Image (cartoon, rainbow, N blue to C red):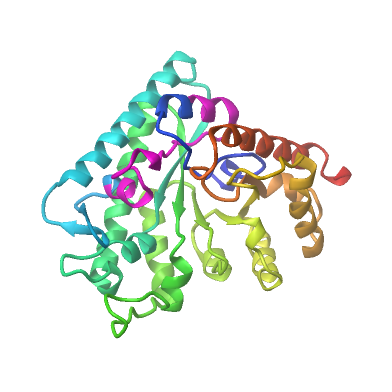
Amino acid sequence: MTQSNFAGLATGIGSWPGTDVREAAAIVLGEFEELPHIVELPDRGLGADMVGRTGAIMVDVELDIRTSGYRVVPRPMLAGRRARDFLTEDLDVLEELWEVSGQRGSGRTVKVQAAGPFTMAAQVELRHGHRALTDRGALRHFTEALGEGLRLHCAELTRRLGVDVVVQLDEPSLAAVLAGSLSGITGLDTVRAVPEPEALELLDSLIETVALPVAVHCCDTDVPFDLLRRSRAVAVAVDATGLRRTDFDGIGELLQMGKTLMLGLIPSETPVRPPHWRELAEPGVTLIDRLGFDRSVLASQVSVTPSCGLAGSTAEWARRATGLARDVASAFADSPDSL
């Protein structure tokens, strides 16, 4: 499979408002016809957030919650059990909806999401309270545990639904990890930057283990486009509102490499005034024009998403946002020159 699994379509980033997984999954399956995703419902609480959910996917890593956040523990505890229960429930509901709607054998592709290894190592503490990122052996172990966990998770999804699967790694902490700007336990406790060559090797080793098309989602303003261009990732997802002129060269080189740009053009939080799809499409068109690419690139190498997860929006806006993403993607595919 190639980058076409991500390009020229609309999809979600992952999270959704509320606690009703059946309703959320039904909406996502119906609205994102080309690339539905497994919904994440962090409003359910402990274990349903991005870090807890990813911990449930990883192998040979157990997490529990402390006042400062998630920490590695030697045996399964409440937070880890809750996270695994939520994940199993979500897969059960998705499988039921898939069968009822007659989707088995339909040829559709489903996207799974997980926090990437650098964000997990930045957000999770080791037993002594330091970020896992401070221990290079722990960072490598997290990478291997996540890669193997995702491989098994995707294989289970394929077995249950009879679908192709693609993977999205959420890396909101990646820029800080590369810059060495994360704080330690105290102000005197520094967290060394991970050199780009090491980060690239770890990321590529994970993608090689998963052996499926992988997109990396960075909602930070300092997206490491050069590293991601050189990586095995076939797509990069970004918040279009956070892009700066200094990002343009990196984006252009990414597209020249044939990778997909997943543009977060749809507000992820409920706007004061609901925008028209044409208004939301304009930044994507302007970007491609400024880069000097033919607008056909909007159909062949760009996909449309909300700017980030939709957990912070209302249920009404979340549904509307999916429709707007579809409308913009359709316009990019059908009539980019008229925009």
Residue 54 belongs to the span the image colors magenta: yes
* Quadrant of the image containing the C terminus: top right
Q: Nearer the viewer, residue 225 or 50?
A: 50
Q: In the displayed image of the protein, which residue is found farthest to the right? A: 338
> In the drawing, does residue 11 fall left or right of residue 212?
right
Q: Nearer the viewer, residue 8 or 245?
A: 245
> Vertically, is 5 above or below 119?
above
Residue 256 belongs to the span the image colors magenta: no
Q: In the displayed image of the protein, which residue is found farthest to the left? A: 75
> In the drawing, does residue 16 fall left or right of residue 136?
right
Q: Position of residue 85 (x, y in %)?
A: 25, 35
Question: Residue drawn 77% across and 40% down?
Answer: 276
Q: Position of residue 14 (x, y in %)?
A: 48, 43
> Vertically, is 221 above or below 12?
below
Question: Residue drawn 68% across and 62% down?
Answer: 256
- How many callouts does the rendering have? 0
Question: Residue drawn 71% across and 71% down?
Answer: 245
Q: Position of residue 96 (x, y in %)?
A: 39, 19
> Vertically, is 232 above or below 2?
below
Q: Position of residue 260 (x, y in %)?
A: 62, 52
Q: In the displayed image of the protein, which residue is found farthest to the bottom? A: 188
> In the drawing, does residue 86 fall left or right of residue 79?
right
Question: Residue drawn 30% across and 35% down?
Answer: 86
Quadrant location of residue 122? bottom left
Please indicate, yes or no, whether residue 33 appears anywhere in the rendered image: no
Please indicate, yes or no, whether residue 331 appears anywhere in the rendered image: yes
> In the drawing, does residue 95 fall left or right of residue 328?
left
Q: In the displayed image of the protein, which residue is found farthest to the front? A: 272
Q: Which residues are magenta?
A: 26-55
